[in-house]
Image (cartoon, rainbow, N blue to C red):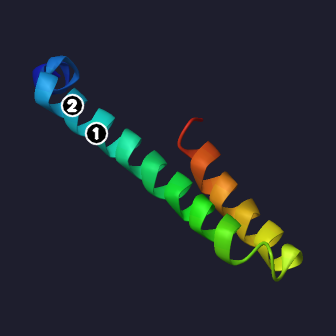
Amino acid sequence: MSWLKQIKQSTPIHLCLAVTFFTSGLVINATQLVLFVTVKPFNKTLYRSLMYYLCYSLYSRVK
């Protein structure tokens, strides 16, 4: 169990997790912006279905 305690207290592990969390959030938000500009003016139904999956992936990281 000491290795688990070391992992929980490891600063580099926490930094890697935080960087991954924020980077994936920025990528998803950038994708949403691109889809808003390119897809929404032409096909709102497709835009909404794509947003559903992007929002699901964004909120699934929070739970």
Outermost residue, right direction?
Answer: 45
Left or right of 29 on screen, residue 53: right
For residue 20, which quarter of the picture? top left
Left or right of 13 on screen, residue 26: right
For residue 15, above or below residue 20: above
Please, what is the three-letter code of the amino acid marked with disc 2?
Leu
Image coordinates of residue 33 in percent, x first then y, are 60, 60
Considering the numbered disc 1 on the image, is that residue within a helix, a strand or a loop? helix
Pointers 2 and 1 in contact (CB under 8 A)?
Answer: yes
For residue 45, above or below residue 51: below
Please, what is the three-letter code of the amino acid marked with disc 1?
Val
Considering the numbered disc 2 on the image, is that residue within a helix, a strand or a loop? helix
For residue 31, which quarter of the picture? bottom right
For residue 44, above or below residue 15: below
Disc 2: which residue:
15
Image coordinates of residue 32 in percent, x first then y, are 61, 60
Q: Please name the residue shown 51% across and 58% down the image.
A: 30
Q: Pick the residue in front: 29 or 61.
A: 29
Q: Please name the residue shown 22% across and 21% down the image.
A: 8
Q: Residues within 10 Å of mark 1 (few under 14, many from 20)?
A: few
Disc 1: which residue:
19
